[in-house]
Image (tube, grey):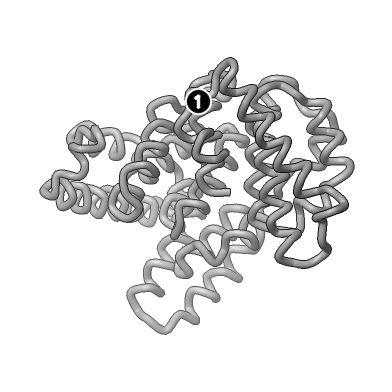
Amino acid sequence: MRVEAIEGSLVGDEMTKLVDGFRRLYEETFSKEHFNLTAEYLSIASGRLGDYLVSLALTGKYEKINELLDEHLWVLNADRRASVLTRLMLNALLSPRVGLSSELKGKLSVNPEELIVAFGSDMLRKYLPALRVAFKMKSPEEEYEECMSIEDSTERRDCEGAVLAVMNDSDAVWWLRWELTYNFNEQILEMESSGRLRELGFNVNVMISESRKLVHGLDGKSLAQLLAIGSSTARIALMLHALIDGNKELAKALALRGAYGAASVAGKPPARLFLGAYKECCDLKNESFRLAIARLFFSHI
């Protein structure tokens, strides 16, 4: 079902078939015959429920979503990562179309601490302190002390610089922008020689230019998020969080970096999904963009 969601057009009868397929999987998973109160089964059930909820959001079945969350929110929350990613996705899809009632908003809201707890292990350790400051989880003083405890001198410097950038230190912000731009350009040019980027339809010069423009438009808090990511799943979570917060430039930068990162590690299909999200970014009322981020969700949940 996920492969069909990723590769299909997701319109008309195809979408109806997809929703029906996820409904059947949900019903089988939650049937009395199969349902099992074990950690492994609840984790599976959380993912099945997430798939079904997001497919319903794409087709405007808002009352059914509310009903399922009333009944099964505890199951969704059994898998922290699946829960956070699903709630972010639902929030992004539902808010622009119907507006969220206070009740539904409470069910779908994801605070920064939940985000970091769920995906902290996927973040680069040296940038986690800056991320916590950016999300107002801890004070700059506390996190600067955390940086000082890092033994490796280069990582300690990077950590301290990122915290200062989040606090709008102009030299630190300039340094982060240079770091992101220089490293990205070097990696892109290195990959170009392999021919993989051309196969995926990447225009290297355009990609470098767009990346530079996006990076130089971001503040220290956004730059810290762009630097901290260590996995594509965490990237999608931060991208959705940025979209919900209205930070479209950060969301677009995350999608562009995701396309390159997937091309260098995971291969063509994931790279094309991120590239599709980047090209359509970032109007959540636009159906093409909604489908693009939904495909990313289905490829990672």
As drawn, is 259 to the left or to the right of 18? Answer: left
Q: Compare residues 205 and 142 and report the one nearer the observer.
A: 205
Residue 218 in sight from this viewpoint? yes
Q: Which residue lies furthest to the bottom in this view?
A: 151
Image point 59% across, 17% down: which residue? 13
Q: Residue furthest top?
A: 12
Q: Please determine whether, in this image, residue 116 is positioned above or below residue 204.
A: below
Q: Where is residue 234 in the image (x, y as percent from the top left)?
A: 52, 53
Q: Mark 1 highlights which residue? A: 289
Quadrant of the rendered structure where residue 12 is?
Answer: top right
Q: Where is residue 168 in the image (x, y as percent from the top left)?
A: 47, 50
Q: Position of residue 142 (x, y in %)?
A: 60, 71
Q: Where is residue 28 in the image (x, y as percent from the top left)?
A: 76, 45
Image point 82% across, 61% down: which residue? 36
Q: Please determine whether, in this image, residue 58 is positioned above or below residue 69.
A: above
As drawn, is 89 to the left or to the right of 182? Answer: right
Category of crowding for the residue at label 1, using alpha-carbon neighbours closer than 10 angstroms: few (below 14), some (14–19), many (at least 20): some
Image point 45% across, 65% down: which residue? 124
Q: Please determine whether, in this image, residue 245 is positioned above or below residue 189.
A: above
Which residue type carries mark 1?
Phe
Image quadrant containing the N terminus: top right
Quadrant of the rendered structure where residue 196 is?
Answer: top left
As drawn, is 44 to the left or to the right of 224? Answer: right
